């Protein structure tokens, strides 16, 4: 009988631990959402977008220059 009792306790605490993890994840997601809507979060998002744009332009410099030249020929 002792084996079934310890098994029950193990299952109970495992379930409780998983519930705690779910709540932690839920709270973290909510905190991130609140932060991203704050002025600091908006500034952070803009900084990340600018950094991404700089990396993209560096990576695709040739393609962008080619596009600009073609655009200038057609509409410039």
Image: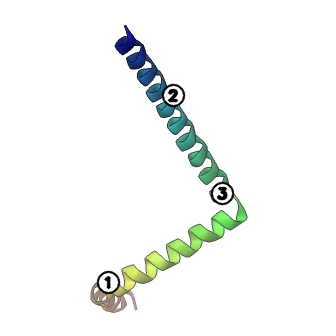
Q: Which one is in front, 16 or 47? A: 16
Tell me if residue 73 comes above or below residue 11 in the rendering: below
For mark 3, give the secondary structure: helix
Task: Choose mark 1 or mark 3, whichever is in front.
Answer: 3
The residue at 57%/75% (across/down) is 47
Identify the residue position indicated by label 3 in the image.
Answer: 35
- Is residue 17 visible in the rendered image? The answer is yes
Gap in angstroms between the C-alphas marked 2 and 1: 48 Å
Nearer-the-camera pick, 57 or 23: 23
Q: Are marks 2 and 3 in contact (CB under 8 Å)?
A: no
- Quarter of the image where one finds residue 36: bottom right
> Closer to the N terminus: mark 2 or mark 3?
2
Q: Which residue is mark 1?
A: 59
Q: Position of residue 25 (x, y in %)?
A: 53, 43
Q: Is residue 38 above or below residue 16?
A: below
Residues marked 1 and 3 touching at CB (< 8 Å): no
Judged by depth in the image, the label closer to the viewer, 2 or 1, is: 2
């Amino acid at each position: 009988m002792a084996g079934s009792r310890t098994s029950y306790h193990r299952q109970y605490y495992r379930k409780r631990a998983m519930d705690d993890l779910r709540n932690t994840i839920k709270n973290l997601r909510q905190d991130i959402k609140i932060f991203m809507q704050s002025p600091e979060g908006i500034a952070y998002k803009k900084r990340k977008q600018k950094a991404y744009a700089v990396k993209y332009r560096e990576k695709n410099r040739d393609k962008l220059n080619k596009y600009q030249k073609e655009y200038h020929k057609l509409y410039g």
